[in-house]
Image (spheres, coloured by chain):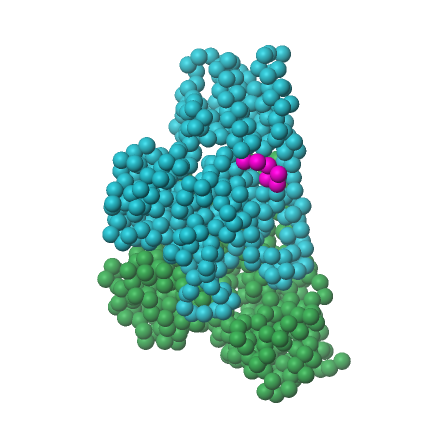
Chain colours: A cyan, B green
């Protein structure tokens, strides 16, 4: 038994989150792709069965009231809220991340002074944010300027209406400095919109504390909501009265069942709702979020850093020097919950890793991406992943 | 046994669709609210269990390819296509109806000549279409003009860019003349967008035959997809190259996994996709659509008209004259698959009907709405509903 195997055992034994793993459906695979699709929480299948058979099948239309379907978007938003540092009443769940980016960015431009004619967007973003930002700019008559997060402070001016940034870079795993970037955006008089897809559920976000204006995120990565589960939208309480949605569906009306021809927005975060909520997926997510009961996000962050540190250590020990290169920052303050290794034949290497029971993913053109979900990944998994990687690379 | 009871029995015995009912989970309730939330098809629970436990739980990320998750929006679109008279390759499933109305109407305006500055919208529409149309008009710099469907021909001009109409009025159940209204819109050089929420699955639509340009619809009414199941978008083949979406998410990119910073639209109906598809709800819908195998939509329409005719006849026979007034057209060519009865104390009456096992719904301020789903409602149900209505009104 190598020293690293021994260390892994000791780290697992001391892990305060180790017990959470049994709340997930897992097998012998080392699953390091929870940053793409989180594993299945064990209580989801039973809940979904109840929603389908009893709530839909037997209660049918009555469930909109009696099973709490109608209020699910805001109720589940309030369950996500503590994970991203938000007080209740500021998050609604629904639609995809892309659609929420559109709502948030258009609403942000409308909140800004009318003479501000530029939108800044993270040039390293997951592409959909950039595409949607381009549409938001086109439809609000603004100019879109793609800049790296590091360039944002220098690019801000009194022409900047809004800035759309990612908290963690989907490719490299770099964590951007949300507090200081938000402060810089505010100092320039602009509105800050954050995409939390790769940070929520992996590290503390502190939306309220840092004065973030608007935020969006998906729920199928570290929040384990299931494939394509609905995204969420955060609107800071002080801005809710000024949230002017480009998608004012009947669910965001002050009186949805009044069936009035004129739109009158609801108050609060409800303004972020659009059409009829997708109940099956939404209530599966609600069940999935129960695994967070009693889990401190600070403990998740501490374990996440320990896991990624340990993985980098194991890779350095096992893999021949120069065969892979980490593109994930070394400094904890700049690291999310994934490790990205650059490797010439990354596509082929990932295929062989998966065949051997270590599941990460490949990001075009040359990145092996390993996500570490602290709720169910252990240190022995990490050591094994590095060992199998070494075997595959040999 | 009354003459109407005898007639109901004979009609049920002669019903070619009577056997479809056993493919649904039903009970002793007379469920006349399938135009709001369709009943549960019996094969859905097992399919959902497989999606959750095996596809998500065991196969996890591999299911995006191996379980056909990625291609579900267009595959399921092709299953809806024959029900609305569309050849394959023109429908994608995803997002809510409201979001699809936005995509369709903005894209319609962009297809029209740039100097056309008006959008016509059905003034009697389900409110969300009107709210979204207002946003689409605002964001494309057009003027929105609400008109009744009857007023459309007179309101069309060389200023009209696009027209958004409902095939069936959600309140009265009036069926609008899709072929002639579409022809009138085209004669004026404008783009025709239809909302099929209250017609798809209840009657033949003939999208291709009548040259409809764009259409949207929900799947949780007569298509029985489940609460808030994803909506769909139809883009006529000849217009797909000109479909310029206001929501160009990564799923509508020509090469989604190329992760390219510049947006390049996919070809075909895929352009209507946006973000990551909501798999649980989408695959529940796919299972639900299997009840249509071997069902002719013409048979559905014939039974639908027979059911609503028979209901009106039973109401006339049982209910004291003047106590309720039908606002649903008598002419078959103007009737959808519901009957709306005006009644002073409609809210209270519907409550008491539901208590007695006859489920319809109440539409503010004074309408009792009864939806007749030919796949699972029989003539004995209809007779019983009218009889219980009479008891409640007495």
Task: Say if residue A14 shows up in the picture.
Answer: yes
Predominant secondary structure, magenta span: loop
Q: How many marks?
A: 0
Figure check: A140 above or below B198 = above
Task: Identify which residue, B304 or A164, lies in the foreground.
Answer: A164
Classify residue A49 as left or right of residue A345: right
Quadrant occupied by the C terminus of chain B? bottom right
* Residue B319 is inside the magenta segment: no
Figure check: A325 above or below B351 = above
Classify residue B40 as left or right of residue A128: right
Provide residue B132's location: percent of width, then percent of height: 40, 61
Figure check: B87 above or below B143 = above
Task: Identify which residue, A211 or B180, lies in the foreground.
Answer: A211
Q: Residue furthest bottom?
A: B321
Task: Identify which residue, A247 or A235, lies in the foreground.
Answer: A235
First to last magenta residue range: A292-297
Classify residue B336 as left or right of residue B156: right
Quadrant occupied by the N terminus of chain B? bottom right
Q: Residue at x 43, y 72 (%)?
A: B124
Task: Say if residue B178 shows up in the picture.
Answer: no
Q: Residue at x 50, y 17 (%)?
A: A313
Provide residue A276's location: percent of width, then percent of height: 51, 58
Provide residue A270's location: percent of width, then percent of height: 48, 56
Q: Residue at x 58, y 43 (%)?
A: A289
Q: Residue at x 47, y 36 (%)?
A: A199
Task: Identify which residue, A53 or B224, lies in the foreground.
Answer: A53
């Amino acid at each position: 038994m190598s020293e690293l195997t021994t260390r892994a055992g000791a780290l697992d034994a001391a892990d305060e989150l180790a017990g959470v793993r049994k709340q997930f459906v897992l097998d012998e695979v080392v699953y390091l792709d929870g940053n793409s699709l989180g594993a299945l929480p064990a209580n989801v299948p039973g809940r979904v069965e109840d929603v389908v058979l009893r709530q839909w099948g037997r209660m049918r239309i009555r469930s909109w009231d009696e099973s709490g379907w109608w209020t699910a978007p805001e109720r589940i938003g309030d369950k996500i809220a503590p994970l991203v540092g938000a007080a209740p009443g500021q998050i609604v769940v629904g639609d995809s991340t892309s659609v929420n980016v559109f709502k948030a960015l258009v609403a942000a431009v409308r909140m800004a002074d009318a003479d501000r004619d530029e939108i800044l967007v993270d040039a390293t973003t997951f592409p959909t944010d950039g595409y949607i930002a381009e549409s938001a700019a086109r439809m609000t008559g603004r100019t879109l300027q793609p800049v790296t997060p590091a360039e944002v402070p220098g690019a801000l001016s009194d022409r900047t209406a809004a800035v759309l940034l990612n908290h963690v870079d989907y490719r490299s795993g770099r964590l951007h400095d949300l507090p200081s970037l938000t402060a810089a955006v505010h100092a320039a008089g602009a509105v800050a919109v954050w995409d939390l897809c790769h940070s929520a559920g992996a590290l503390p976000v502190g939306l309220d504390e840092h004065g973030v204006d608007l935020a969006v995120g998906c729920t199928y990565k570290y929040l384990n909501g299931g494939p394509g589960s609905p995204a969420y939208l955060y609107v800071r309480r002080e801005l809710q009265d000024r949230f002017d949605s480009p998608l004012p569906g009947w669910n965001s009306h002050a009186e949805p069942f009044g069936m009035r021809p004129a739109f009158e927005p609801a108050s609060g975060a409800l303004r972020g709702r659009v059409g009829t909520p997708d109940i099956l997926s939404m209530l599966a997510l609600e069940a999935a979020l129960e695994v967070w009961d009693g889990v401190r996000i600070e403990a998740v962050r501490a374990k996440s850093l320990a896991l990624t540190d340990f993985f980098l250590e194991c890779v350095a020990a096992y893999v021949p020097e120069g065969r892979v290169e980490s593109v994930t920052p070394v400094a904890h303050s700049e690291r999310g919950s994934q490790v990205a290794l650059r490797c010439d034949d990354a596509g082929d290497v990932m295929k062989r890793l998966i065949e051997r029971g270590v599941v990460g993913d490949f990001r075009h053109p040359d990145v092996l991406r390993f996500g570490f979900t602290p709720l169910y990944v252990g240190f022995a998994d990490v050591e094994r992943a590095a060992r199998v990687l070494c075997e595959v690379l040999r």
